[in-house]
Amino acid sequence: MNLGKKLVFLAIFAGITAGISAQSARVIPLDMFLIIDSSAAMERSRTEILGWVDDRIIGEILQEGDRITVWSAGERSQVIYSETIRGSTDLNELSSRLNALDASSRTADFSGALNELRLRAAAVPNDRLAYSMLITASAQGLAPVLAGENRNILRWSRSDRYERWQVFVLSPDIGPRVQQAARAYMDSRR
């Protein structure tokens, strides 16, 4: 996906918390990647987090033809849902899987999910938009991410903070693209 397309996409979704309705705003199909903290820290905010996902992602963003992959980040990360949305039955199944999420792990393996997310996001065809989010209630869970190979993913993220949790909108491959665009700009100035 070229840098211009990514920037347009990020601009479109910058209003996610402002309540933009994807059903009326988007015609390009979406591949959404969602990582949800399933550590015990998430349990305190479970109702609020799942309500937000239900309202904002299931209710406003996803539409027929979109694909979504959801990881549960517990002791180890695992995909708990990965389907193309064909209608309300799929949205209801997604909601059911999220509500059944076990949030009792001691830690959250975000690194494992982010590694897999990067591979999947890189394979998204150019005629689709890739959109990645990480929802966490555990600052401890992010420490390994900030120290490891995925630290640049958070460098180019946007964060919405709530009382006890936060959502990161990620762009897993934008760092090298920004560097490439900066080099091209500097070369054009010579």
Image (cartoon, rainbow, N blue to C red):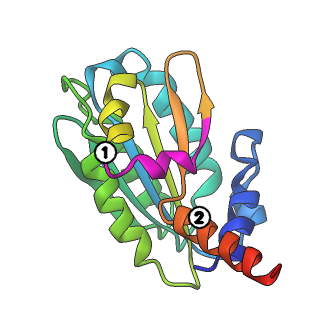
Q: In 3D space, how far apart are the residues under numbered discs 1 and 2 (Cα atoms)?
A: 34 Å
Q: Secondary structure at mark 2?
A: loop
Quadrant for the N terminus, please: bottom right
Farthest right residue in view: 189
In this image, 12 relative to 147: left or right?
Answer: right
Question: Callout 1 environment at 10 Å: few (<14), some (14 to 19), or many (20+)?
Answer: few
Q: Secondary structure at mark 1?
A: loop
Quadrant for the C terminus, please: bottom right
The picture quadrant where one finds residue 43 is top left
Residue occupying image coordinates x 61% and y 74%: 180
- Residues at circles 1 and 2 in contact by the CB criterion of under 8 Å: no
Residue 122, x across and y down, in percent: 42, 74
Name the mark nearer the viewer: 1 or 2: 1
In magenta, the rendered stretch is 148-159
Q: Which mark is residue 148?
A: 1
Q: Amino acid at mark 2?
A: Gln
Residue 138 visible? The answer is: no
Residue matched to label 2:
63
Whether 150 is among the magenta residues is yes
Residue 22, x across and y down, in percent: 70, 59
Of pointers 1 and 2, the one earlier in the residue sequence: 2
Residue occupying image coordinates x 54% and y 46%: 155
Residue occupying image coordinates x 46% and y 77%: 124
